[in-house]
Image: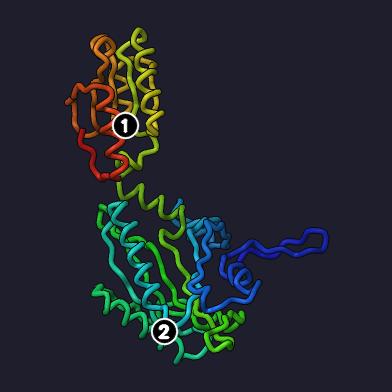
Amino acid sequence: MFPAMDDDGTRFRMKPMNCPHHFMIYRSQVRSYRDLPLRFAELGTCYRYERSGTLHGMLRVRSFTQDDAHIFIREDQIAEEYNRLLDLGDYLLKVFGYEYRAALSTRPEKAIGDAAVYDAASDRLAEVLRDRGLDYELDEGGGAFYGPKVDILVTDALGREWQGGTFQLDFLMPERFGLEYVGTDNHRHRAVVIHRTLLGSMERFIGGLIEHYGGAFPLWLAPVQVRILPVSEQWAPSARELAAQLREAGLRVETEERDTLGYRIRAAETRKVPCMGIVGEREAEAGTVSVRMRGAGKKQVTMERSDFVRRLREEVAARALTTRI
């Protein structure tokens, strides 16, 4: 953690995690068994005083934002909730084009609480994974200090492995924070918490994603999806009209009118823009566009502008990993 700060006698600390804040929100009122599962999520920024020698670009930083959630459940809801999380994690990773594997991390030496409770929680997660038919590796001693976890480890295009989502089952912190619900018997019972991130640190995920695609993002994911290039200044108004059509369709588009056409094509290729639309005299008069896709070399296809817009929208809506125009 960062050291405490003092402001006119009031001491502050930079928040290292989101868990206690979500716990206090849960405790702010009486909860019923009917309320569970209760899911709190936020893109929360945290601060950790990592040693300077361990910092590494976007992959290991001192200030990071993670898609953090805490799910409050009854014990009989563990299997159902974990299956929901694994379904969601599988969907997200397939959208981004990742292969992945699962790991079950068990009790470390410095775990808190009753070892028997921790081990029983590990057994429960192993049962969920087996019933699901999901192959997993056992990471002995790799769990959190408060409970076992299922980690999702993603593999990028170069075969390197990155930490993805993590789903941590926690019986111990609910006891320390007094997280309870009123059951069907009208008595108070201890809740169970799942600590959940799907993508993890946004900085680390985006850094890994850049490495995975080598900066050549698929059309739906690229910061600039289309660059419109007029052959010369004379055809710039027609190029701007096409760009306006694309923006109206929800696409991220730029026009580039400076320098020679050859220079602008090379610049778009260098920046790995997925799609270029070239507008000259013939295209302006016919209401068409010459389309040049990233990686297609000098191959160009002439299309009606309405078809061009429609095809790009379809590719984006499908979140296609490769674009075929």
Depth check, front residue: 36 or 219: 36
Which disc number belongs to residue 315? none
Q: Is residue 305 above or below residue 168?
A: above
Residue farthest toward the top in the current orientation of the protein: 234
Which disc number belongs to residue 270? 1
Q: Is residue 177 above or below residue 323?
A: below
Q: Does residue 238 appear anywhere in the picture?
A: yes
Residue at left 56%, top 78%? 32
Residue at left 38%, top 12%? 237
> Residue 262's x, y, as percent?
28, 18
Residue pointed to by mark 2: 121
| Of pointers 2 and 1, the one earlier in the residue sequence | 2
The quarter of the image holding the C terminus is: top left
Give the side of residue 29 with respect to residue 74, left or right: right
The tally of labels here is 2
Q: Amino acid at mark 1?
A: Thr
The residue tagged with tag 1: helix, strand or loop? helix
Give the side of residue 315 with respect to residue 52, left or right: left
Q: Amino acid at mark 2?
A: Ala
Which picture quadrant has residue 223? top left
Give the side of residue 320 with respect to residue 41, left or right: left
> Residue 156's x, y, as percent?
29, 55
